Amino acid sequence: MKKIVAMVIGALLLTSSFVFAADVEDPAEFPTRPITAWIPWGAGGGSDIVFRTLAEVFPDYSGGQPLLIRNVPGAAGAVGTAEYMSVARPDGYDFLTWAGAQTIKTHVSEVDYSVRDFAPVIKLISNYTYVLVRDDSPYQTVQDFVDDAQQRPGEISWGHAGTGGGGHLSSILFQRATDTEVVYVPFGGGGPAAAGLLAGDTEISMNIPPEGLSNIEAGQLRGLATLSPDRLEQIPDIPTAREQGYDVVYSQFRGVVTHKDTPPAIVERLHDILKACLEDPRVQEKYYDMIVIPTYAGSEEYGRANIEED
């Protein structure tokens, strides 16, 4: 009986190993079907727009295979990240977009993952946050906001992309620098936060370009300050917080990670495709217009930076 059981177990192990091996694709042929980018933020937010722009040129560097976008917003990236972990296979056909906000989330909230649970693929871009108001807002400068906020602490509604995310953290840093207290209103991403400001759900909002940028161009929203060291070339009329007397600078990065068990050769192939997309002149031009700064880092360097921040 023991010999029979052992033979059955051996056969099962052999079969399962064969099935797994059959599922592992030759990196030289990857990809042979569409790839899905999981974005744990709502449509219209910074990550969403950045990767939809990459998707426009993706087939040119992937042998014609498209990049599909899957938005799973909630809890400053935690919902989509957790869902990705539960269903993604280690074959490279599903990758997760990773923003600095997701690293922050692992420090400020109870989540069932860390940056060490993923294989780093590539760091793509960075961008600086900015403070937005509606065009009809009485705040013309940061000082206007500060004067009002200090007279009625805890009453001004302030929107951001989600509790524990980058917009939230930069808002906290801004409040500390200005010695103000507001009521935070979290949304399911930067796009919804900008839309909430436009709809009058909040009085002021912290966002990242390109969120709200088209509304600024249309005269619907105004920028009170950028949290950049110097004025941004594309929006030179918006002063920095620093030049208005408040020394706060904040930027976020965005990149790609995948299932930690993805074969290194597949990770390398994904990296090469995405790097080619990033370097495409069409993408570079659109990123410039969206005030998105290409800040490439390869898998190893990107992984070290993520772990250090973790």
Image (tube, rainbow, N blue to C red):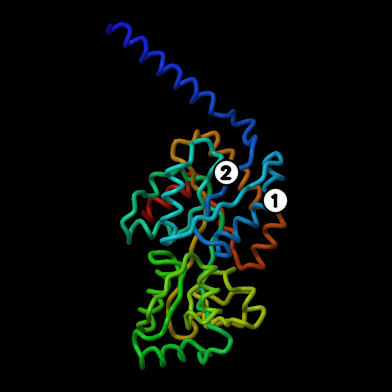
**Viewer-proximal residue, 132 or 288?**
132
> Is 269 above or below relative to 228?
above
Residue 209 in the image: state x and y as whole percent.
57, 69
Crowd tier of the residue under label 2, counting other residues whose Cα lies within 10 Å: few below 14, some 14–19, many 20 or above: many
Hey, which residue is sitting farthest left in the picture? 2
Q: Is residue 57 above or below residue 245?
A: above
**Label 2 sits on what residue type?**
His
Amino acid at the residue labelled 1? Val
Taking the image as shown, residue 58 lies to the left or right of residue 191, namely: right
Establish if 38 lies above or below 234: above
Q: Is residue 65 left or right of residue 163?
A: right
Image position of 67 with respect to 186: above or below:
above
Mark 1 and mark 2 in contact? Answer it, CB < 8 Å: no
Give the numbered dot on residue 118. Answer: none
Q: Nearer the viewer, mark 1 or mark 2?
A: 1
Q: Is residue 98 left or right of residue 6?
A: right
Label of residue 57 in the image: 1
- Mark found first going from the N terminus, 1 or 2: 1
Q: Which residue is mark 2?
A: 271
Q: Residue at the location (69% across, 53% down)?
A: 56
Quadrant of the rendered structure where residue 210 is? bottom right
Q: Nearer the viewer, residue 116 or 87?
A: 87
Write the residue at 28% across / 6% down.
1
Q: Nearer the viewer, residue 265 or 109?
A: 109
Residue 135 horizontal/vertical position (percent): 58, 86
